[in-house]
Amino acid sequence: MLHARRPQYRTSLQRRRTAALAGTAALAAAALTACSSADADTASDKPATVAVNLSGSQVKAGEQVKVTARGGKLTEVTVADTKGTKLTGRLAEDGSSWTSDRKTAPGASYTVTVQSKGDGGAKDSKTSSFRTVAADKVNKLDWRPGAKSTVGVAQPISLVFDHPVKNKAEVEKQLKVETSNNTEGSWGWMQDWSGKDRVDWRPREYWQPGTKVKLKAQLAGVDSGEGGWFVRDYATDFTVGERQVVSVDLDTKQLTLTRGGQRVRTIPISGGTPGGDKASWRGTTVLMSKEGTINMNSETVGLGNSYNKMVDYSMRLSWSGTYAHAAPWNAAYFGRANHSSGCIGMSNADAAALYGQVRVGDPFEIKGQETKGLIAPNNGFGEWNLSWDAWQAKSALRG
């Protein structure tokens, strides 16, 4: 009987030991679980780690601002200079990065403000700043037409640069034209009559009357190449007035002004003397300015001492000195013969009437058999003499 009871005693003891070990294991597992839970809670409270690619006071200009986040995502990024100008940007779909659309300008101080959220929901806000190195050489531009002006249907947007533009494509990308009716147009590069680089935006056809136009030249931070950096943006806006066209027929010696397709006035004229440098240009040009009474000296346009006189109702048509104006000294030739030094002359009364009716930007369409050739695109606004394909080919972004 004693021999039979020993196995039962050992079995009971083994069970008590097994239960004790199981209890110890369960206790240890509970402790590990509690520790892991605490670590997770701590991790969930951590904000995202944010980094900005630019810092310090000697940052190279012309760089995009890039902000990244680890352990969370970006919710909002603002980059602004001391003048309050902001660099807009794009946030990645997952919120992991933000990149500015524009590049930084030389000699500018920027503040970067970042709102972020950690993976566990912890929100944070950080601010940093940097300054770009000033430009050794600054490029600027002059533009036409002026802001808030009303112009004729042939007026192009024209930009002339102070210094050469080597990086034409980079510059052209930053020139944004907005119109109220989605007018088709293109930029075209040329050398201005002054010898400087110039780029014009011309519609495919004459503007529709009433069109509202805005130019945004977002050039701050763009390197023009040999000409240096742009450090500011430019903008202008204008409205297109009613359709007026001045037709000049050098064969019949008549000038006709039409408005909205209807004839307003026909004027007898005398154009440039055929057979030499005093002949008139042919082709379409644009009224550049109404200059009133000015001194005209033939020596300034390479014609020796042919004339030096005060001229009334002067309407400039080219940089080379072509005008429509009053020419009472030539009255015997109006409607009969071309006998001027290249300009379109008429009586005082007719010149006064035309001067009062035309506006800057109106086209002058000049035709005739005996001229000295087609006016060049850069001699005033002669780009209308190029076909649409030929004009588009002058864009730095073409092809």
Image (cartoon, rainbow, N blue to C red):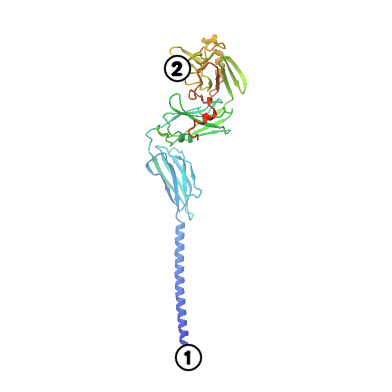
Inspect this view and state whether residue 314 appears: no
The quadrant holding residue 203 is top right
> Nearest the camera: 51 or 317?
317
- Which residue is farthest bottom? 1
Find disc 1 in the rendering and name its residue: 1
Label 2 – label 1 distance at C-alpha: 142 Å
Q: Residue at x 46, y 73 (%)?
A: 23
First of labels 2, 1 by sequence position? 1
x then y, percent, for residue 137 = 38, 33
Mark 1 neighbour density, 10 Å: few (under 14) some (14–19) many (20 or more): few
What kind of element bears circle 2?
Answer: helix
The quadrant holding residue 209 is top right
The amino acid at mark 2 is Val
Q: Residue at x 46, y 69 (%)?
A: 29
- Which residue is farthest top? 332
Inspect this view and state whether residue 35 appears: yes
> Nearest the camera: 320 or 115?
320
Describe residue 79's horizontal placement relative to residue 359 as left or right: left
The amino acid at mark 1 is Met
Find disc 2 in the rendering and name its residue: 301
